[in-house]
Image (cartoon, rainbow, N blue to C red):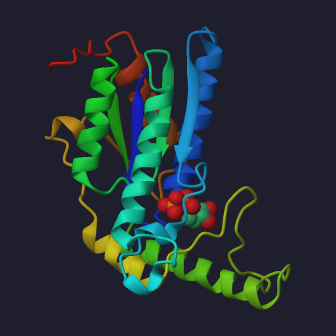
């Protein structure tokens, strides 16, 4: 079944939306024939990939790592292997991550075609300023935790919801990723169909988008995928 590539700026709400999509798909699968599909959510967090692998500054490279660029390539290889291991005509795979390089999205599209399953892109739209605020807040929380492990934030501050990690990007790494981000293009076959959710989309709007995504990929009119197309 389909591969859904989630993409967006760093700390723009991708994991939040990916978890919502995962829950929605689980519901749809359970409402039909549950033995027909399996569902997987793959992300940097599920593979324990640190945000530091995206940091190209040489000072960020730990002693045992070949180079900053090599560590990102290794991370992509791990994600690719994880997708390849499960992707089939019976598996829904939600790939939550930056997925910011168009060549990488093309590679994933080819992988889906090779197993004759459709793919789509879910873009998480969020302003640069808001995404930056989220990262800055995470950096502040991380600092507080390092100073006083177990300490609660002051009342009224944004608290990280249960189940979420405190993975923040170093500010230069964050800026660099925003600069390098290659927006999906709905005219490119590897980025289409392209679905978009924005930060302010409420539950009804979000479910409508997820419903459209389901119809496009698993509904009656879902495309027949041929490897040589
Ligand atoms: P990313 O996966 O892009 O790093 P996350 O999904 O982890 O981003 O979200 C970052 C923070 O923003 C989290 O604390 C999350 O609860 C909050 N958040 C994400 N999306 C929304 C939204 N649409 N509305 C309100 N808060 C959100």
Tell me where residue 227 appears, x and y as whole percent: 22, 18
* Quadrant where the C terminus is found in the figure: top left
Tell me where residue 193 appears, x and y as whole percent: 27, 34
Q: Which residue lies furthest to the right in this view?
A: 150
What residue do we see at 74% from left, 86% from top? 146
The answer to whether one can see residue 55 in this image is yes
What residue do we see at 60% from left, 69% from top? 167
Tell me where residue 142 appears, x and y as whole percent: 67, 81
Q: In which quadrant of the rendered view does residue 107 lie?
A: top left
Q: Which residue lies furthest to the bottom in this view?
A: 147
Q: In which quadrant of the rendered view does residue 173 lie?
A: bottom left
What residue do we see at 43% from left, 31% from top? 84
What residue do we see at 38% from left, 72% from top? 67
Q: Is residue 47 above or below residue 5?
A: below
Of residue 217 and residue 48, the one placed in the foreground of this image is 48
Of residue 112 and residue 84, the one placed in the foreground of this image is 84
Question: Relative to 151, is 209 on the left or the right?
Answer: left
* Quadrant where the N terminus is found in the figure: top left
The answer to whether one can see residue 184 in this image is no
Of residue 132 and residue 117, the one placed in the foreground of this image is 117
Task: Classify the position of ligand 1 by quadrant: top left, top right, bottom left or bottom right.
Answer: bottom right
Question: Relative to 50, is 181 on the left or the right?
Answer: left
Q: Is residue 158 above or below residue 38?
A: below
Of residue 37 and residue 126, the one placed in the foreground of this image is 37
Q: Is residue 55 above or below residue 32?
A: below
């Amino acid at each position: 079944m389909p591969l859904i590539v989630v993409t967006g700026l760093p700390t723009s709400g991708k994991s939040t939306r990916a978890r919502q999509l995962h829950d929605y798909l689980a519901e749809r699968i359970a409402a039909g024939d549950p033995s027909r599909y399996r569902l997987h959510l793959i992300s940097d967090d599920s593979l324990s990939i640190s945000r530091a692998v995206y940091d190209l500054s040489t000072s960020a490279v730990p002693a045992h790592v070949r180079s900053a660029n090599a560590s990102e390539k290794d991370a992509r290889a791990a994600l690719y292997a994880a997708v390849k291991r499960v992707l089939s005509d019976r598996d829904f795979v939600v790939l939550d991550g930056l997925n910011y390089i168009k060549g990488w999205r093309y590679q994933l599209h080819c992988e889906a075609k090779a197993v004759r399953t459709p793919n789509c892109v879910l873009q998480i739209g969020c302003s640069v300023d808001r995404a930056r605020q989220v990262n800055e807040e995470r950096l502040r929380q991380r600092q507080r935790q390092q100073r006083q492990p177990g300490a609660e934030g002051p009342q009224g501050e944004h608290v990280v919801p249960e189940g979420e990690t405190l993975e923040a990007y170093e500010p230069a790494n964050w800026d660099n990723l925003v600069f390098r981000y290659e927006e999906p293009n709905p005219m490119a076959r590897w980025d289409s169909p392209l679905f978009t959710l924005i930060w302010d989309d409420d539950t009804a709007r979000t479910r409508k988008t997820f419903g459209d995504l389901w119809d496009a990929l698993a509904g009656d009119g879902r495309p027949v995928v041929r490897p040589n197309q």
